[in-house]
Image (tube, rainbow, N blue to C red):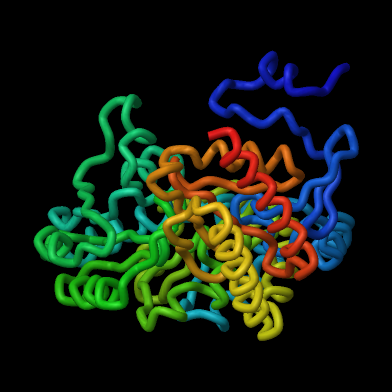
């Protein structure tokens, strides 16, 4: 059997359009394809591979747990799930954990919990959910409707109701939308897919205060920002604002699928037995790998190292831009960074991504105008330098073709 890009077209649903490159091996921040071509990974599986590829701690946890027990379902609990939950609650505001398999499922659980909490405490009229334009919260029908990008939610029939949106960082409009019938506000503490948009301090504090005033729950979607990505274990810890519910996934498993919803005891009690569930959520294999990832990331060395690496990226991108004049700014924090294309290159983010691949570098986009970088949190400094040198060649290629 020829396993190549043509086989994708033959056997896969066409909702993706992947690159011709098929990686077969990864180690650290480097990846090799079927032909043995080497790439430096500045994409990290979209902020998932927080420790790069085949990190010894993750491989060891997978092998060890793989020879013990893989799956039980939630008619029983298991040791890795309980150990990880204890570590998550000890390290955050939360008291309770619910496990899922992805960020979308963690967000689905958060939204269902908020609605049930409001129904139990205040009545059926308190069901409004406020979210933000350009936000992204997953691909289930509920989460994609809450996400503020109609292109992802249109075309599937009637949407879940009582969901409204306003612009991120627009506190005045938000103030006009929130009322006593609002049950929850869902936001990313730094918008990822929407273009790497950071929250203004007054905005995020104002949202928290208005939630308190109207008895609404504040849900932080930390699927992309969590587990060290911004240089804090979770982004809320650097904002001076604590949510009522937090979702985490992506980097939580370091590449193994797992998601979790974190909340307080008082809120959690509204998900009584039978109200929500997941067959695979909290399975021992996923939790064992996630525990190893969490233990490795949640150290001063790794979290402080994120900030050092951020500065290397910023300095390198600034040097490239001094030469080629393609970016208007570099947005973001930690190792969730977006180089924003200026007017001359607007709408051409994918050209930079494709040119990067041509030059042995894996990168991402965030919309049509932003080149996004979400590498391993422990990427060696030599790989950052080499990756930026390859990116400079990619930029030169795009500029020359203009």
Answer whether residue 21 is visible to the viewer in this image. Answer: yes
Task: Tell me which corner region of the image, top left, top right, bottom left or bottom right, holds residue 66.
Answer: bottom right
Quadrant where the N terminus sits is: top right
Q: Is residue 218 left or right of residue 190?
A: left
Residue 108 percent across, percent down from the top left = 42, 50
Q: Residue reaching furthest top? A: 10
Q: Is residue 223 left or right of residue 85?
A: left
Q: Nearer the viewer, residue 30 or 282?
A: 30
Residue 241 percent across, percent down from the top left = 35, 79
Determine the residue positioned at 74% across, 18% down: 7
Determine the residue positioned at 80% across, 63% down: 58
Q: Nearer the viewer, residue 188 or 217?
A: 188
Task: Tell me which corner region of the image, top left, top right, bottom left or bottom right, holds residue 78.
Answer: bottom right
Residue 383 percent across, percent down from the top left = 78, 62
Q: Nearer the viewer, residue 374 or 12?
A: 374
Determine the residue positioned at 36% across, 75% down: 266
- The answer to whether 122 is drawn above or below residue 66 in the figure is below
Q: Is residue 153 left or right of residue 282?
A: left
Residue 281 percent across, percent down from the top left = 60, 53
Determine the residue positioned at 55% across, 49% down: 278
> Total marks drawn?
0
């Amino acid at each position: 059997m020829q396993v190549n890009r043509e086989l994708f077209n033959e056997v896969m649903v066409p909702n993706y359009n992947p690159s011709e490159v098929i990686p077969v091996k990864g180690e650290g921040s480097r990846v090799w394809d079927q032909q043995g071509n080497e790439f430096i990974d500045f994409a990290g599986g979209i902020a998932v591979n927080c420790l790069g590829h085949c990190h010894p701690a993750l491989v060891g946890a997978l092998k060890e747990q793989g020879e013990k027990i893989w799956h039980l379902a939630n008619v029983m609990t298991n040791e890795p799930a309980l150990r990880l939950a204890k570590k998550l609650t000890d390290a955050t505001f939360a008291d309770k954990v619910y496990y899922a398999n992805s960020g979308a499922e963690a967000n689905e659980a958060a939204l269902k919990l908020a609605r049930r909490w409001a129904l139990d405490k205040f009545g059926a009229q308190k069901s409004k959910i406020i979210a933000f334009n350009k936000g992204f919260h997953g691909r289930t029908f509920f989460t994609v409707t809450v996400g503020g990008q109609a292109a992802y939610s249109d075309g599937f029939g009637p949407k879940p109701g009582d969901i409204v949106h306003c612009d991120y960082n627009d506190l005045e409009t938000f103030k006009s939308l929130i009322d006593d019938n609002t049950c929850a506000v869902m936001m990313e503490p730094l918008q990822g897919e929407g273009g790497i948009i950071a929250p203004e301090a007054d905005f995020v504090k104002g949202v928290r205060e208005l939630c308190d005033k109207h008895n609404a729950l504040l849900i932080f979607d930390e699927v992309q920002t969590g587990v060290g990505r911004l240089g804090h274990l979770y982004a809320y810890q650097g904002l001076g604002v604590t949510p009522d519910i937090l979702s985490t996934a992506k980097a939580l498993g370091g590449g193994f699928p797992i998601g979790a919803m974190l909340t307080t005891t008082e809120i959690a009690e509204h998900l009584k037995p039978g109200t929500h569930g997941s067959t695979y959520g909290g399975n021992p294999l996923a939790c064992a790998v996630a525990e190893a990832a969490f233990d490795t990331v949640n150290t001063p060395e790794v979290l402080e190292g994120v900030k050092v690496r951020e500065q290397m990226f910023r300095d390198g991108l600034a040097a490239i831009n001094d030469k080629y004049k393609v970016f208007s700014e570099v947005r973001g924090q930690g190792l969730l960074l977006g180089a924003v294309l200026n007017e001359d290159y607007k709408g051409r983010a994918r050209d930079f991504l494709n040119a990067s691949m041509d030059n042995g570098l894996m990168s991402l986009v965030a919309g049509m105008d932003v080149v996004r970088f979400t590498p391993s949190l422990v990427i060696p400094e030599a790989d950052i330098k080499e990756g930026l040198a390859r990116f400079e060649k990619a930029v030169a290629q795009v500029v020359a073709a203009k």
